[in-house]
Image: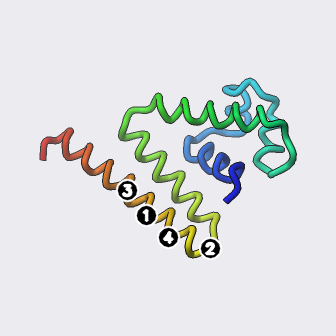
Amino acid sequence: MKTYEIMRCRRQALGLTKEKLAEKTELDPKLIEFYEDGKNTPSYVETKIRMTLMKIFQDMDPMTHYKRRILELALELNSQDEVKFALLEIGHMIIELGKMQMDMMAMNKV
């Protein structure tokens, strides 16, 4: 997957519209659209998008973070036809699910 495709999946997993992301990054919504369509955009556009999405993930509580990350991986998996990549994404999902399970068990002291 291309970076712009991963960032689109991440944005969608976070429940952000292109317009909302444009507002948070202080970029023109057309730049977000061009970037996600794989069109040639200045490098600062990708940097702002990456940094903004990373900050949003970092500011989440752990359970929400795990849920959104797992959703992101599922969106990436859904967009991919290559078996090798699909297996890699499934492995990442299993790791995130395991971390989420451990945190849930620790919270409930099971």
Determine the secondary structure under disc 1.
helix
- Residue that numbered label 1 is attached to: 91
Instruction: State yes or no: discs 1 and 2 in contact (Cβ < 8 Å).
Output: no
Which x, y percent locates residue 60?
Answer: 44, 32
Q: Amino acid at mark 2?
A: Glu
The residue indicated by pointer 2 is 82
Instruction: Say how many tags the image has.
Output: 4
| Residue at mark 4 | 87
Q: Residue at x 80, y 51 (%)?
A: 37
Amino acid type at image mark 3? Ile
- The residue at which mark 3 appears reads as 95
Between 49 and 108, which is closer to the camera in this rendering? Answer: 49
**Residue shown at 55%/41% (left/top)?**
14
Q: Secondary structure at mark 4?
A: helix
Mark 4 to mark 1: distance in Å? 6 Å
User: Residue at point 62% right, 32% down?
Assistant: 51
N-terminal of the pair, mark 3 or mark 4, is 4
In the image, is 36 to the left or to the right of 94?
right
